[in-house]
Image (spheres, grey):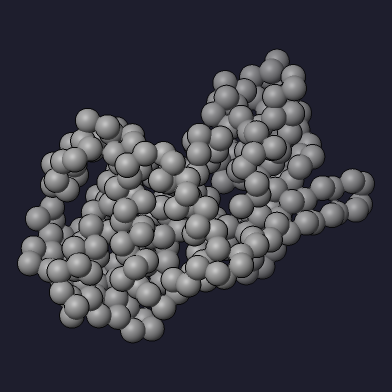
């Protein structure tokens, strides 16, 4: 499958009634004592109904991820799943997470096409059984898998380090929602590193973050903003600033104390504010 298939399918999914759990982006500007917050809304016409058709959801998202795998590993196109799975790279966390979500979707997809009764679900969980595999998943985990795939398929305009840190959080939460899994590749998901995780509920994107150079330009210290109360468990800040006409976006979670980042590490966080849209 080609990139045009991915583009067209993603475009169609913008207008579904499905529960997709993207982070809510809140653009923030602070001037003196005044704070402006703009919430980016996701428009949806609801014209493409998928919410109540779990089998079609599974087929669409498995096909999307399968196309992504073929696009990024063209030597595997046309191969069977087992060959693809064993051959996919595991060089970094993004590779590992992609491979394991592909595995979960394959179990769901096989069950959905082999028997009308192979998938059962209610408001709390989904169970998929086929000849060589079995999966039990809290229903919220299915929505998180779909969101993972859509975030993964965002184009090369995204900050790779930011995407990986955000997807680690989704992967952790999918693992928490996974009741059991059993197939020819084992009975658990492959673990990823202890690298940064970004809170996925709300991202406050501070557009005019304050910073200072320290130690002859070796470090940058960023003025942190605090989040109080229960919100601190699911929301955090991204700090946007410009140095020599280059825009950077630094998530609060990766700053070391006291609110520092090495200048040598900044290149991983270069940001194009014109694209993508906030969600």
Q: Is 147 placed left or right of 72 in the picture?
A: right
- Vertical placement of 255 versus 216: above or below? below
Quarter that holds the N terminus: top left
Residue 60 pos. (x, y %): 36, 59
- Vertical placement of 210 versus 236: above or below? above
Residue 251 pos. (x, y %): 60, 43
- Residue sitting farthest toward the top: 216
Q: Is residue 74 visible?
A: yes
Residue 98 pos. (x, y %): 33, 46
- Residue sitting farthest toward the bottom: 122
The residue depicted at 41 percent of the width and 39 percent of the height is: 3
In this view, the residue in front, 259 or 200, is 200
Count of picture labels: 0
The residue depicted at 22 percent of the width and 69 percent of the height is: 112
The residue depicted at 24 percent of the width and 63 percent of the height is: 109
The residue depicted at 31 percent of the width and 56 percent of the height is: 62
């Amino acid at each position: 499958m080609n990139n045009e298939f991915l583009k067209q399918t993603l475009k169609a999914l913008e207008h579904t009634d499905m529960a997709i759990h993207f982070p809510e982006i809140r653009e923030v500007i602070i001037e003196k004592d005044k704070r402006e917050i703009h919430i980016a809304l996701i428009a949806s016409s609801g014209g493409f109904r998928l919410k109540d058709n779990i089998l079609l959801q599974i087929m669409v998202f498995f096909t999307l991820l399968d196309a992504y795998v073929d696009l990024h590993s063209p030597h595997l196109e046309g191969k069977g799943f087992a060959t693809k799975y064993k051959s996919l790279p595991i060089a970094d966390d993004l590779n590992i997470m992609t491979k394991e979500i592909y595995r979960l979707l394959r179990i769901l997809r096989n069950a959905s096409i082999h028997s009308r009764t192979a998938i059962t679900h209610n408001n709390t969980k989904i169970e998929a059984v086929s000849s060589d595999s079995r999966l039990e998943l809290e229903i919220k985990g299915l929505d998180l898998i779909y969101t993972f795939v859509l975030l993964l398929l965002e184009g090369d305009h995204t900050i790779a380090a930011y995407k990986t840190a955000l997807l680690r959080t989704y992967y952790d939460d999918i693992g928490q929602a996974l009741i059991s899994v059993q197939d020819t590749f084992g009975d658990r998901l492959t673990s990823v590193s202890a690298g940064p995780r970004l809170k996925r509920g709300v991202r406050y994107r501070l557009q005019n973050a304050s910073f200072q150079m320290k130690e002859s330009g070796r470090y940058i210290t960023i003025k942190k903003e605090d989040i109080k109360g229960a919100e601190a468990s699911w929301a955090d800040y991204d700090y946007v600033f410009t140095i020599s006409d280059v825009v950077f976006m630094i998530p609060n979670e990766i700053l070391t104390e006291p609110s520092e980042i090495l200048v040598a590490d900044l290149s991983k966080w270069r940001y194009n504010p014109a694209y993508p849209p906030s969600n």
